Image: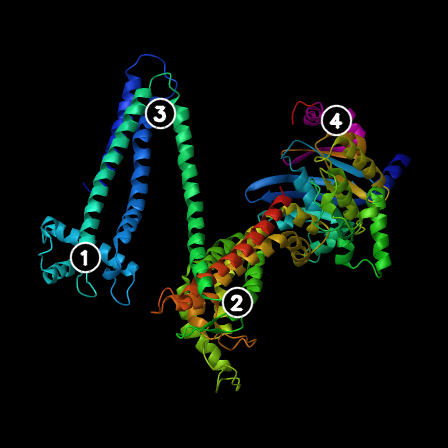
Amino acid sequence: MKDQAMTTLETSVTDQNNKFSANNVDVYYGETHAIKDVSVNIENNTVTAFIGPSGCGKSTFLRCLNRMNDTIDICRVTGDIRLDGEDIYNAKVDPVQLRAKVGMVFQKPNPFPKSIYDNIAYGPRIHGLFKTKADLDGIVENSLRRAAIWDEVKDRLDAPGTGLSGGQQQRICIARAIATAPDVLLMDEPCSALDPIATAQVEELIDELRENFSVVIVTHSMQQAARVSQKTAFFHMGNLVEFGDTTKIFTNPEDPRTESYITGRIG
Amino acid sequence: MSTFTLFCLIVVLAVIGFFAGRHKVNSQSKPLHSLPRYYGTYVALFAFIPALLVLLVWLLASPIFLGKTIASQITADMIPEGGSAELVLSDVSRIAQGLRAGADNGLILTENINDTVNLAVLADVLASSGVFLGGELNPDVLQLALSYTDAAAFSHFLMICVVLGLAMAGFVFAYGRVNPEFWARNRVEQTYLGVLILAAGLAILTTAGIVLSMLFETINFFQLHEMRDFFFGLNWAPNFHGDSELSILPLLWGTLYISLVALLVAVPVGLFAAIYLSEYASKTVRSVAKPLLEVLAGIPTIVYGLFALITFGPFLKDWFGDGGFLGVNWMGDARSVATAGIVMGIMLIPFVSSLSDDIINAVPQALRDGSYGLGATQSETVKQVVLPAALPGIVGAILLAASRAIGETMIVVLGAGAIARFTGNPLEALTTITTRIVSQLTGDGDFNSPETLVAFALGLTLFVITLALNIVALYIVRKYREQYE
């Protein structure tokens, strides 16, 4: 009796703790069925890693969470994805507003051909997040500090963002995403174009970001998933094979396919 | 033997060379360095290329050489009053042509022409082969023409001997070298390289030749006319008394003003069309609209000129002219800066849109994704990310369009008018450098007068201006290309 009560309580707590809840999501690219009936919950203040072999649909699913797939003509999404209980594919939801709440960092660092300052100020300017120039300065400095790059660029905020090294550029992109004050940060293989040192810096940063955001990260590196995430989802050929605590997935996977992938037999 | 037969002969020789070379190595049992056809090609190329080159050079050089020789024999008493040595020379070559044609038709025997021949009858014969003489046939000139014919015949004979001899020599030389250890493949490769270099060199040489011919006539002009008046004078007033004012400045003003109007039309329309096509249009719309827009680029400029002259100019006059719909009398003539400029702008729209479209498409998708990912709308993304990234390339495209506008001729000839002056009113007629070049060269004025030669100075100046614009534009475009590679 007492056990049951505890379980019910836990479930409701978990429900409240969910940032995103996706149920029965299918994605089609024209004729191709890219995502097949995927259901995932993404919790607050948690790093969730999506792993799986190339072409398994993990990036596609990530792009459903901020409706980036809308920019692809032939892409069709069905199912139910809720952010804080609100259906994001509802006709009343403006994808532009949604993307301000769900920031995204891409595989290749893509700073705009503007100054570092203007790169960070881009989102706040578009969404009118400040009243005075001093506010904006504050947002820029704060974002750069949280992306752990302030000390490296504070003296050259007017220099073009494209002139930095790859790792610095990626941290600029993270700072740019933070500057719009999102709730969730989606990262699509953020370290695949970076060297090991820059990767370590970004990973450390991801761990710190967890205090304020939920982070969803797509990665090819199993070590990275194990290092930075608390939850891991394993995708294979458009299916969500297994989803659970990272430690459990990596030490005691339930599905044989997960085990094969983690031990390097498929991929 | 005609030149064509000679050409066929060396082709035949080359074909024989191919089979002979291939057969020679095939008949030996040793292993070959290259494929048999390379040995054949090697012999064929040696028989063909040197002979062909000599043939071409000979055909180009011999008339010049013969002309020089004859010109040195023209004496003062052969030159009629008011004529010149050049005119006599052209008579000589025309008569020689007529004599040859007459001989080919069997009307005259060149050997029978001597001092006793009836000149009037001969003139009739020449007329029947299409050579009409202005005055009476001068016996001295006829003698020169005869010696010209002889020299030309001799030169032709010599050419046949040299070319055939060279083809044979090449054949024998190459055939002798061919053996199974010979690196025929590498040699053939080198020859191809040589041919390609020659083609590229020819294109560059031609450009240099064009510039030089302009330059010489321009120097002639500046010997007859003051340079200061041309570059810094304020009036364009050619006349026949020899005291013309020939200044480029009013013409340059007209050219730049009309080009500016054209760009004011072409740049916004073309750029917006490019943005729509590359950022907003669906695949189907794009696949239909882009070729349709580029049809505009295929319309000959003379057709645009006619459009300006008979449709658009009168249309403007209906609005702004005397008794027009607006009730203002601002426009006297259908031909004006606005007429030519706007029509030229329409012509340039596909040029600007097509180039800008390519450049906008070259902006990496990652930048757009980055902007959308931050919650920017499509137009915010275009304005703040795509266009700034594409800006240098777009500036280059605009400069290229400007250099086309400055060099454009037919539209301004028909649409702009002929008055050289400094005016800021777009509804008045103005004239441009190109229209003045056309009108100075198409009159029946003396070629060696400054009024005619000024066309070359104008042309060269125009060339320098557009060349500079193109260089700047290409530099900018190239610099931009490097950014994303």
What segment is highlighted magenta in the picture? A238-263
Q: Residue A257 placed where, x, y %?
A: 67, 26
Q: Give, as a three-letter code, the residue at label 2.
A: Leu
Contact, CB < 8 Å: mark 3 with mark 2?
Answer: no
The C terminus of chain B sits in image quarter: top right
Contact, CB < 8 Å: mark 1 with mark 3?
Answer: no
Please give the count of numbered marks on the rendered protein: 4
Task: Tell me the distance, in whole angstroms, between the alpha carbons under discs 1 and 3.
Answer: 57 Å
Identify the chain of the residue marked 4, using the numbered disc in the image: A
Dot 4 falls on a residue whose secondary structure is loop
Residue B252 is tagged as 2
Q: Residue at x 60, y 46 (%)?
A: B481
- Disc 1 marks which residue? B140
Q: Residue A242 placed where, x, y %?
A: 72, 32
Label located before the other in sequence (1 or 2): 1
Q: Give, as a three-letter code, the residue at label 1.
A: Asp
Q: Is residue B409 visible?
A: no
Q: Give, as a three-letter code, the residue at label 4.
A: Pro
Q: Is residue B288 visible?
A: yes
| Camera-side residue of B271 and A53 | B271
Residue B360 among magenta residues: no
- Disc 3 marks which residue? B38
| Camera-side residue of B358 and B220 | B220
A97 in relation to A222, above or below? below
- Disc 4 marks which residue? A253
Task: Tell me the distance, in whole angstroms, between the alpha carbons under discs 3 and 2.
Answer: 58 Å
